[in-house]
């Protein structure tokens, strides 16, 4: 498992760049939610429909103005909005309100990797924290087991050492790690099986992260 990790991270980074040029599958929320970022493009969920939006572009009445640090500045029908990843404007994508379910504590496992258990769409998942991955990355077999809807996803292609590969971008309705659940998380579905789900920045950026020796603590913003 440890030997596979560097190559997986490289493949995730390459595939995510190409795949974010396509749209994601349908999400379950209404309103406007920032689900992730790739370069200057924002992965948004607008009235339940995933959209990718470059700076200066407009879709469904929403115009992407600029990035302000990690926050996206938008214009929605004349109203200026400043969105952080995971923060909704209307209904949906809200973080849990239970104060007891706002922190994830992850001890380092063998090899120094931070591993955690949880679920995607209510189906069990084994996660590995990967701060170098832009999106959560899920293997095809796990995505099917978890009921991830790929019917509306567009495909992107990239060249790897083994030839071309196909990847699909989705917005996961629910991702739970420990006792903390967030919604509308940008993810890349990989064409092959993976030994675990890479917990990338589309999930991690919703938390304040700190590390105490061999323990990582993630607290909802």
Image (tube, helix red, strand yellow):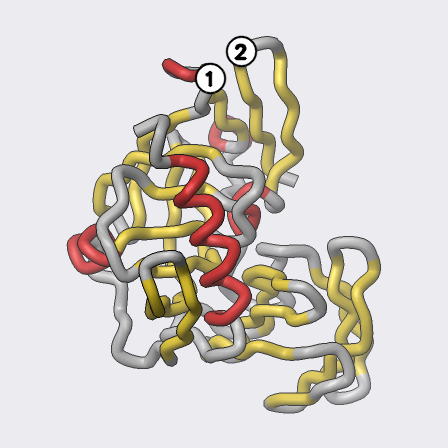
User: What number of labels is visible?
Assistant: 2
Quarter-of-image position of residue 71: bottom right
Residue under the point 80% across and 77% down: 65
Closer to us: 133 or 70: 133
Closer to us: 37 or 93: 37
**Residue 53 versus residue 194 in the image, above or below:** below
Dot 1 lies on which element? Answer: helix
Structural crowding at the residue carrying mark 2, measured as other residues with C-alpha within 10 Å and reported as few (<14), some (14–19) or many (≥20)? few
Closer to us: 152 or 174: 152
Dot 2 lies on which element? Answer: loop
Residue beneath label 2, please?
A: 214
Determine whether, in the image, residue 78 is placed left or right of residue 189.
right
* Image coordinates for residue 171, horizontal then vertical, percent: 42, 64
* Image coordinates for residue 38, horizontal then vertical, percent: 62, 63
Residue beneath label 1, please?
A: 112
How far apart in space, not on screen, are marks 1 and 2 (Cα)? 8 Å
């Amino acid at each position: 498992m440890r030997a596979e990790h560097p190559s997986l991270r490289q493949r995730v980074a390459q595939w995510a760049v190409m795949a974010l040029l396509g749209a994601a599958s349908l999400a379950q929320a209404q309103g406007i939610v920032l689900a992730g970022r790739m370069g200057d493009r924002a992965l948004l969920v607008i009235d339940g429909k995933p959209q990718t939006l470059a700076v200066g572009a407009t879709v469904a009445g929403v115009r992407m103005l600029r990035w302000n640090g990690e926050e996206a500045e938008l214009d929605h029908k004349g109203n200026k909005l400043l969105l952080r990843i995971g923060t909704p404007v209307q209904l949906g994508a809200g973080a849990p309100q239970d104060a007891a379910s706002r922190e994830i504590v992850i001890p380092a496992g063998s090899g120094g990797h931070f591993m955690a258990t949880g679920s995607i769409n209510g189906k069990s998942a084994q996660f590995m924290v990967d701060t170098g991955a832009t999106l959560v990355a899920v293997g095809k077999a796990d995505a099917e087991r978890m009921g991830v809807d790929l019917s509306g996803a567009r495909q992107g292609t990239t060249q790897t050492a083994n030839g071309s590969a196909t990847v699909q971008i989705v917005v996961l309705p629910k991702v739970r790690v420990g006792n903390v659940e967030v919604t509308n998380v940008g993810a890349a579905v990989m064409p092959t099986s993976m030994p675990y789900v890479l917990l990338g920045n589309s999930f991690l950026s919703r938390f304040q992260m700190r590390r105490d020796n061999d323990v990582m603590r993630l607290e909802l913003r």
